Amino acid sequence: MDTDHTSDWDSGKMLSQALVDDIFRCMKQLLTGVSAIVLFLLTTITQAQSIDPAKLAGVWENRGTNFTQRQMFRADGTFESTITSDTAALNRRESGQWKLADSILTLTIDQSSDEGRSGQSASFRVQQLTDEKLVIQKKPDQPQATVTFTRIKN
C-alpha cells in the first residue's frame, strides 16, 4: 500500500500560502487602521496646540546675566522692544509689526536704534505660551536654543 503523499504536500503548501496571504491581508488592514488613528491624533494634537495670537498681547521680560530684554506686544499687531545691558554695546530700542501664525512669531522692525536693523524681519517658533510664560526657539535648526520670557503684570 504505497500512498502518494505528494498531493498532501501540495495541499499543505497551498494551505500555507493561503494562510500567509490571509495574514498579510489582515496586517495591511490593521496598518491602514492604525495609520488613520495616528493621522487623527496628530491633527487633534496640532489643533489643540495652536496658539491664540491674542494671548501674546502684553509686556514680556527676559533677564539674562548682564541684560534685560522687554517686549511689548500690542493687540493691534505692533511691538516695542528694549534691551538694556551693563554695557552700552547691547542697549537697543526697536518697534515694528508682529504676526503669529502656525506657532511662528515674525517680527518686522520698522525703527531701530541699531543702525541697519530697520526693515529687517526675524522669525521664531513659539514653543510655549501661557498666561505667565513665553518660550521661543531662536533658530529652527537648534531646538535647544530657546529664550524664556515672563509676563510683566502692570
Image (cartoon, rainbow, N blue to C red):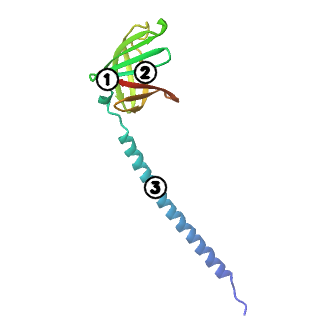
Q: Nearer the viewer, residue 6 or 111?
A: 111
- Residue receiving disc 1: 153
Q: Is residue 125 above or below residue 81?
A: below
Q: Residue at x 73, y 90 (%)?
A: 2
Instruction: Give the left or right position of residue 57, taking residue 25 as reference.
Output: left
Return the mark for residue 62.
Answer: 2
Q: Which mark's residue is nearer the viewer, 3 or 2?
A: 2
Q: Residue at x 39, y 21 (%)?
A: 61
Callout 2 secondary element: strand
Q: Residue at x 48, y 19 (%)?
A: 64
In terms of sequence position, does the residue under pointer 3 or pointer 2 come before the other? 3
Q: Which mark's residue is nearer the viewer, 1 or 2?
A: 1
In terms of sequence position, does the residue under pointer 1 or pointer 2 come before the other? 2
Q: Nearer the viewer, residue 19 or 137?
A: 137
Instruction: Give the left or right position of residue 16, taking residue 27 as reference.
Output: right
Which amino acid type is shown beneath numbered disc 1? Lys
Which amino acid type is shown beneath numbered disc 3? Val
Q: Give the x, y percent position of residue 104.
A: 40, 29
Q: Quadrant of the C terminus?
A: top left
Instruction: Give the left or right position of residue 73, taking residue 90 as reference.
Output: left
Q: CA distance from mark 1 to mark 2?
A: 14 Å
Q: Quadrant of the N terminus?
A: bottom right
Residue that lies at the very extreme toward the left in this rendered image: 76
Residue that lies at the very extreme toward the bottom in this rendered image: 1
